[in-house]
């Protein structure tokens, strides 16, 4: 069974689900396999199809992976939010705290998520030039987004995280992945959703992001 969604509804209501994951309902393997089959229909650079999907459902292994997730998350950090980042996040409402509240909930319950999906791609880009990175990431991101859309259509929720980054080598070892040859691209919790009534998110207007024929400096926002 799939949800009765138009293509536009599917694209606009596939949300990053953190607080509305059903932590008590197993996800059938057959559904995950269907999502992977659809994911691998995505375009890939030079048709190399270097993608892989590592799915973790075994309880003991999920505990191991959840522990790595929790320890990696505080290390992920990344660049601090700029003033303009915060302005965009809070354009319609104070959503910054909602995002972090959802992340705190997910972290506290990560061991209860019934399935983890770790998409991977052959070839490392740690020190590669932008052209090489673009080719590698452009060959895995469309497939993962297709997986997430297919999951949404089946009543499943996902959220893209990169928490595996700081401890990628340890996660690779835990899953038997050859770290020197395979790059773990993301860490995606997967579960049925509590309800399926997701709505389009509030976003900044088109005029803030659309540039026609050439880059146009925006006059709105704190640092436009």
Image (cartoon, helix red, strand yellow):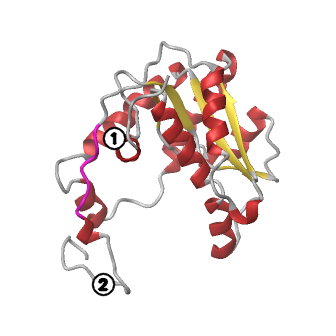
Q: Is residue 99 visible?
A: yes
Q: Is residue 113 left or right of residue 218?
A: right
Q: Which residues are magenta?
A: 199-205
Write down the quadrant of residue 164 in the picture: top right
The structure residue drawn at horizontal position 19% and vertical position 57%, both measured from the top left corner, is: 91
Write down the quadrant of residue 108 in the picture: top left
The structure residue drawn at horizontal position 17% and vertical position 48%, both measured from the top left corner, is: 93
SS at badge 2: loop
Residue 99: image x %, image y %?
Answer: 32, 42
Which residue has dot 2 on it? 216
The structure residue drawn at horizontal position 39% and vertical position 59%, both measured from the top left corner, is: 80
SS at badge 1: helix
Report the Cα–Cα distance between label 2 and label 1: 32 Å
Location of residue 190 with respect to 40 vertically, above or below:
above
Q: Is residue 176 left or right of residue 209?
A: right
Location of residue 105 with respect to 137 vertically, above or below:
above
Which residue has dot 1 on it? 100
Tell me, yes or no, whether the highlighted magenta stretch contains residue 197.
no
Of residue 129 and residue 168, the one placed in the foreground of this image is 129
Q: Main secondary structure of the magenta part?
A: loop
């Amino acid at each position: 069974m799939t949800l009765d969604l138009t293509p536009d509804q599917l694209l606009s209501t596939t949300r990053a689900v953190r607080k509305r994951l059903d932590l008590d309902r197993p996800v059938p393997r057959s559904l995950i396999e269907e999502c992977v089959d659809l994911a691998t229909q995505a375009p890939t650079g030079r048709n190399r199809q270097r993608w892989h999907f590592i799915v973790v459902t075994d309880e003991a292994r999920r505990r191991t992976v959840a522990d790595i997730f929790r320890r990696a998350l505080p290390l992920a950090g990344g660049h601090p939010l700029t003033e303009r980042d915060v302005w965009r996040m809070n354009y319609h409402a104070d959503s910054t705290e909602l995002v972090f509240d959802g992340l705190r909930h997910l972290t506290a319950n990560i061991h209860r998520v019934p399935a983890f999906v770790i998409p991977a791609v052959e070839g490392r880009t740690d020190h590669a030039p932008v052209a090489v990175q673009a080719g590698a990431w452009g060959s895995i991101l469309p497939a993962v987004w297709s997986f997430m859309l297919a999951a949404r259509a089946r009543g499943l929720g996902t959220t893209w995280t990169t928490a595996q980054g700081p401890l990628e080598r340890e996660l690779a070892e835990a899953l038997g992945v050859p770290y020197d040859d395979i790059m773990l691209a993301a860490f995606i919790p997967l579960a049925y959703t509590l309800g399926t009534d997701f709505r389009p998110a509030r976003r900044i207007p088109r005029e803030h992001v659309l540039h026609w024929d050439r880059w146009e400096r925006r006059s709105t926002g704190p640092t436009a």
